[in-house]
Amino acid sequence: MKALCVRSPNNIVIEERPMPSIKSPNEVLIKVKAGGICGSDVHIYHGTSSVATYPRVIGHEIVGEIVETGKDVTHFSVGSRVIMDPVISCGTCYQCRIGRSNVCGKLQVRSVHVDGGYQEYIVMPQESIYHIPENLSWEEAVMIEPFTIAEQVCSRAELSADDVVFIMGAGPVGLSILKRVKLSGATCFISDIMDIRLDFARQYGADAAINAKNVDVGEEILKLTNGTGATLVIDAVCSLRSLEQALTYVCSAGRIITLGFGKEPSAINQLSITAREIDIRGSRLHNHKFPVVIDYFASGKLQVKDMITHRYHFTEIHDALRLIENPEIENGKVVLFF
Ligand code: MN
């Protein structure tokens, strides 16, 4: 079978690998059908991920069909359509015991620390897969994983309908968070420097879509919030300055959610946090969010068809990466088919 392996930074190859086989009775063999390309896959490809190791089969937004089951597999059978959970946790450390297994002390992420799903077949334990609702196509089902990220952000933020949310950045993550925030009934503003993304944001129900190239974002947020600032600021830009900026957009008693993995320090002062009792919280991966997100998809509350803009066969990975990195081409989610 074939696999897409990043052997070293900037070197991704289509490798011939032996068929994986079930080694434990609770495992299943999955024929991979489709996989989304995530910003983090692109980072690993370029060697700019601060956590990935090489060589690595990337891909963590993976759906497929079960072709074989181990003898202890109870919830799935041959033919089941499933999605892969990328998070692997130990189940016994402090974080796992308090229900925060996404930041497990021994955390491993499929596609980052161990091989992911850009391969024709993959073996998975049944605890790490979920059924895909029948009403979803393979490519729609690919979007379930990105929405677990959005769900985690909203959970960490303790989002309520009362919130006035400002999402910095309208890339795939920012837009997924926007769709999820709008489900809650909260007001939601969003910014970006690309007009096409802001157009998407307006279609998805943003109450204001701000082009940060053309206006002073701080002034705009004050105007939109009658001078108070946003109750919740989500930093989906994750640049050197974005955390500093987030602190100027948030109101007293507000929350800031960070998503970045940058190692460069930010220049923030204690006064701006203490005097206004600001909560700054990180949000990483997701913590058992597949069931709730799958419910949103199954019931039709979350519609994602309009987020997928490009499709490639997995052997065209180089074309797909070129497309994603071409600033002239506007793209949403790019999906590989297997
Ligand atoms: Mn992803």
Image (cartoon, rainbow, N blue to C red):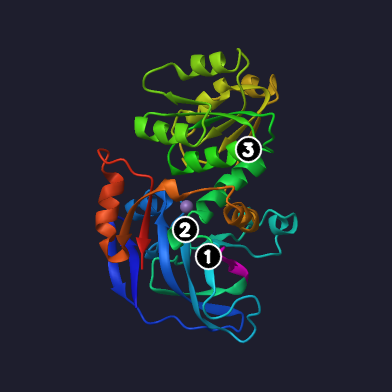
Residue 116, picture quadrant = bottom left
Which labelled disc corresponds to residue 198? none
Residue 56 rendering spot, x and y as whole percentages: 39, 64
- Few, some or many residues within 10 Å of mark 2 (<14, 14–19, 20+): many
To which residue does mark 1 refer?
84
- Within-10-Å neighbours for mark 1: few <14, some 14–19, many 20+: many
From the top left corner, tell me how far across and down residue 84 is, in percent. Answer: 53, 65
Q: Are marks 1 and 2 in contact (CB under 8 Å)?
A: no
Label 2 SS = helix
Task: Of the two numbered discs 2 and 3 on the same chain, state the one appearing first in sequence.
Answer: 2
Whether residue 49 is situated above or below residue 25 in the rendered picture: above
Q: Please give the range of residues in magenta.
A: 127-133
Mark 1 C-beta to ligand 1 under 8 Å: no
Residue that carries the numbered disc 2 in the rendered image: 142
Q: Amino acid at mark 3?
A: Arg
Which residue in the structure is indicated by mark 3?
A: 281
Q: CA distance from mark 2 to mark 3?
A: 27 Å
Report the front residue among 275 and 295: 295
